[in-house]
Image: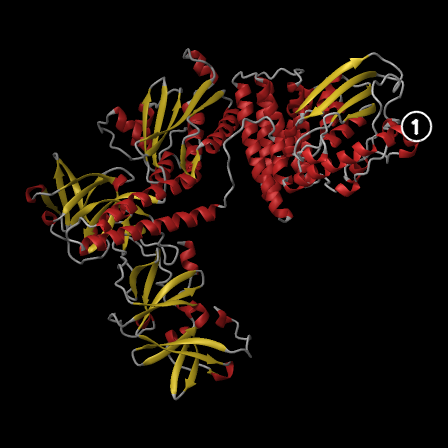
Amino acid sequence: MDMNEIKEIFFQECEEQLAELESGLLKLNDGDRDPETVNAVFRAVHSIKGGAGAFGLDDLVAFAHVFETTLDCVRSNKLEPNQDVLKVMLKSADVLADLTNAARDGGYVDESRSRALVKELEALANGEVPVASAEAPKAQPKPAVAAPTDDSGFQPIPFNFDGFDEDETPADAGQVYEISFKPRRDLYSKGNEAALLLRDLSRIGEMSINCDLESLPDLDKLDPEESYVSWMISLRTTRSEDEIRAVFEFAEWDCDLEVRAAEASPSGEELPMVPVPFDLSILNDDASAEAPAPSPTRDAAETPAAAAETATEASKMAAAAARVERKESAAATAAAAAASNTAAAAAGQTIRVDLDRVDRLINLVGELVINQAMLSQSVIENDTTGTSSINMGLEELQQLTREIQDSVMAIRAQPVKPVFQRMSRIVREVADMVGKSIRLVTEGENTEVDKTVIDKLAEPLTHMIRNAVDHGIETPEKREAAGKDPEGTIKLTAKHRSGRIVIELVDDGAGINRERVRQKAIDNDLIAADANLTDEEIDNLIFAPGFSTADKISDISGRGVGMDVVKRSIQALGGRISISSRPGQGSTFTMSLPLTLAVLDGMVVTVAGQTLVVPLTAIVETLQPEAAAVHSFGANQRLISIRNSFCPLVDVGRILNFRSTQANPVEGVALLVESEGGGQRALMVDAIQGQRQVVIKSLEANYTHVPGIAAATILGDGRVALILDVDAVVAASRGQSLKPEMSLAATG
Amino acid sequence: MSYAVKSVSQGDRELIAFRIGDQEFCVNIMSVREIRGWTPATPLPHAPAYVLGVINLRGAVLPIIDLSARLGMKASEPTARHVIIVAQVKSRVVGLLVEAVSDILTITDDNIQPVPEVSSDLEKQYAWGILAIDKRMICMIELGSLFPETESEAA
């Protein structure tokens, strides 16, 4: 694994940590005061800092460090996490995300913003915190990467720590603490290293250590992964007990730690145990060790007997340590990640898989489904009795393939959470920009949907959120005047409903101003001045192309590109969007999307001898036209009357150039479709073969985009069938020509 | 494709020769993925006459080009005896309908004669060189120039 791969893993983890950070901060914002939430937030920032340090990403480290310092104040209850504080912190989380992205692929970072936030964060930390305490956690073992695992360097040499701190702490000052440190098995399995912790401890005061080897079993009974060794430490320091505990902060869940103040006494005199020689020299291999080299001779001379006494035990310990370390080195990277997540709730086991591999699997399963269908078909054709064991076997095979397909699709399914989290940032930023106070409430963020849908969902959702903040929610003054909470609420929910995902965006703003919408629509020639529209029809006008109610064009919700773009992109995903609004109480946008883009429910139809698939979502109803209902209109237009309204008939075969003359409508079937831009059309096809779930295949991969055709699929007989692009066909029927965009077609 | 590197000489070239009408053509064997029999294609709307449609090649949608029509000769009437040469053209895979595969040739650059000056642009565009083997004339085709890719990237 080369450095870039490790770096890539780091950035992937950063993403997770940032998500953790944001959700933690949002929880705090909602009044959650669980110390574990604060810890989770702190850990997230700390892990990013640690990793960034290892890769020399200085900007990231610097910012994370300031952020961490402030969070530390919250953690130690020196700073109350009220709304103002959290506002700064949420912004900081955004900047941290920007910095991470910048470090990853050179994205844009607003430097003035990050500098301003650094100042704000520092102001929050507000001098109550000595710089030193911020330094202490910095000396923590960095997650992974560099822990030296050179066991050959482990030779017990007696020495004492006097040499470490002479220049830092006056020997005769401060309080003596008795610290009992007993690591548990988990401490090592998470990649922590007791010796590193002890070294950090040695930096904050004058220390003497006694190693308790009491519970160390004989070598043959020794479990290399178990923790047997504990330490009694006597530390003379000027620092507080909290700061001592801070040294163990990442390990405190995995060890028994006792810190108590002892009576001040001359150092070393009252130690109850015989000092066991303890070696920290290997630690100096670590590049980050700044401590002066220990001078073993002095101590050795003082306690030669002790050294001899414990030599055997020490070698035992060395063996144990060596084996533990080997184990650790194997798991180094993984363990580092685990260590940074110490107290995070034990989530289900997950693996990272390259998306390409999943896609390949999905493709293969698609093949399998087609193949199975082909096999079934040929067996049915050749086996008239329909009772043979082959038939039974085939049925089982069919069930199995269907199950495999469902399971494979489930692999790609992801919770919508990341998209929802991105929205909370947008709400914050846009609300800030327009001077409104808005809270985003999300629900059902664990609802799962195919990754491709998630990726494509972000854009329309962003647009809608911006709209809701900019136009939907009123200013605090207006809200108060209307007797509402000055803080607006936007609620984003996701849920599964009948094989689709339904996303609702509810704001408690002013609702749609129908008078204004109507006026605007008249001004823009969208409707006639005397048109008689229902409330619902007026509401839906906002989806009309080129419609925007904002009086002044703002940066926030764009220039004239409005909800029509949103509607288009939702429809491009095979989804639908609708709005309902109540004046003074807010609006609700409801989107319904397919769970996956890899398969599609389609109606298989025949047109001019060709088999086509029409997406089921586009079809409103199907009907058999009667001769009396079909009316000629002008030279070559035909209308069909459906329940007393007239709807243009569109011959699909003609539009696609499959035949030169219009088919007789009475002999075919009409599919009533609703398309973008509103309005219904009746698409004429020759016959309906049935409904089927089809696997979508790209035409563009080997050919080029074909106008009027959305994609291709492979049917049970192994032949390729084309999937109709209903919107393009309808547009073509309005006179816009289906322009062939050719490349393979291009003659030079 | 690899023809573009005309300077890479010395080494032997391997080519697949095939017949269209009474003429013989050949392409670099490295661009050929497989050769298979003709299966009816699903026609594409608004496609040029030489695009016969698409077929299912083990799950991929493969466009079928009538090479005869593409080279400006008369359109083929595919029968079961026709074959499809599945070829990689830049990032795409296309199926070329030809009458029959006739030979696999190993040649050196010395065998290649330049294309004589002819009036037609079409021939000049795709013909890369001419081989004279056993009194036969075999035209070397540059597939990349027959199916330019650039425009579709924008589409």
Picture quadrant of residue A129? top right
Residue A186 coordinates in the image, percent (x, y): 63, 29
In the image shown, does A287 or A747 lie closer to the viewer? A287
Amino acid marked by disc 1 = Glu
Above or below residue A250? Residue A103 is: below
Q: Is residue A55 left or right of residue A25?
A: right
Is residue A89 or residue A156 the one in the foreground? A156
Q: Residue at x 12, y 39 (%)?
A: A641
- Position of A688 compared to A468: left or right? left
Q: What's the residue at 35%, 40% (across, down)?
A: A406
Q: Which residue is mark 1?
A: A302
Picture quadrant of residue B48: bottom left
Can you tell which quarter of the image residue A489 is in? Answer: top left
Height in image: A250 above or below A724? above
Name the secondary structure under disc 1: helix
Residue lying at 49% horizontally and 30% vertically, measured from the top left: A421
Q: Is residue A139 at least partly visible in the picture?
A: no
